[in-house]
Image (cartoon, rainbow, N blue to C red):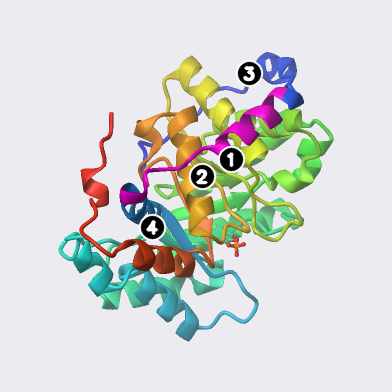
Amino acid sequence: MSDRNPGMDLDLEWVSKVRVNTQAVLKRAQQVQGRKVAKKEWQAAWLLKAVTCIDLTTLSGDDTPSNVHRLCMKATQPVRYDLLQSMDMHDKGITTAAVCVYPSRVADAVKSLKAANSSIPVASVATGFPAGQTPLKTRLYEVRMAVEDGATEIDIVINRTLALTGQWADLYDEIRQFREACGDAHMKTILAVGELGTFTNVYKASLVSMMAGSDFIKTSTGKESVNATYPVAIVMVRAIRDYYLKTGLKVGFKPAGGIRTAQEALVWLVLMKEELGDQWLTPNLFRLGASSLLGDIERQIYHYVTGRYPAYHELPMA
Ligand SMILES: O=C[C@H](O)COP(=O)(O)O
């Protein structure tokens, strides 16, 4: 993960000045979406790169120790051995970036990964995921419980009520408290962009979350009716860039919710590369939150691997 973001005092003047130009954002998102993603011979390598950035997720009411165990095993070997062999990658130990589960399933995931001798981090959603509509006391308790059970990454959801009513100082204070409850665990802050109404709110919520010490900002829970979209991502990554320019602190970005195809994964990588640069193209600063993406990526890699194609560690990075 990135070095922890210590955050900063709430700069309300900065937050209140924010105005996002909707037309410019939509135009830029269209450009990114229309990009030819990568030359054919590099696509499998980029897809493997995407795999290393996935937070492999199960967030279902019917999660059990068994399906969490299967998820963990998939995370330790996300791509079939023979496909990796075709790319001379069999010895590279490709894993997903993390597994992501509900707080009550953290202990199961920790146990499975430990038994498999794997150091893949366990991420837990928390703070009343997905709606965040529970008392602060229980939201804080949830964070502490997940950390105690072994989660080293916590995906908190913000209080949308505070964002929608412009109570930015209160939102800042809550996130600061979550941050403290996380202890050494890294904190990803879910904005639930589909419920924030305007791009300006998304930008403001991004800034406040980063000022309060979030290590990542994340688009969605996957449970809202609108989840990770490219226009909203443009707004969030530009807030990340502005925060970096002002403070020198790098905050990561995690699109999540509804990401299902290899082609989409490639577009997300292009968006990061063009907006934030190669240094953001690592699991330390970029994650794809997804429960059903890996299958399509494996299918596409199988499709591409008909000859000797370059592997992801050979990508020309600046
Ligand atoms: O945080 C991750 C999301 O909940 C995953 O959403 P998804 O099930 O639509 O891939």
Q: Residue at x 40, y 52 (%)?
A: 50
Residue 41 seen: yes
Secondary structure mostly seen in the magenta stretch: helix
Which numbered circle lies on residue 33?
A: 1
Q: Secondary structure at mark 2?
A: helix
- Which numbered tag is attached to residue 12? none
Of callouts 2 and 4, the N-terminal one:
4
Looking at marks 3 and 1 on the same chain, the residue that comes earlier in the sequence is marked by 3
Q: Nearer the viewer, residue 187 or 261?
A: 261
What x and y, as percent, mark residue 83? 27, 69
Task: Determine contact: label 2, label 1, CB under 8 Å.
Answer: yes
Which badge, 3 or 4, is on the more N-terminal residue? 3
The amino acid marked with disc number 3 is Asp
Three-letter amino acid code at the position of disc 2: Val
Q: Residues within 10 Å of mark 3 (few under 14, many from 20)?
A: few
Which quadrant, please, contains the N terminus? Answer: top left
Whether the magenta-drawn stretch holds residue 134 is answered as: no
Q: Which residue type does callout 1 highlight? A: Gln
- Pointer 4 local density, CA inside 10 Å: few below 14, some 14–19, many at least 20: many
Residue found at x 62% / y 46%: 219
Q: Earlier in the sequence, mark 2 or mark 1?
A: 1
Of the residues tagged 3 and 4, which is closer to the observer? 4
Q: Count of labels shown?
A: 4
Q: Which residue is mark 3?
A: 11
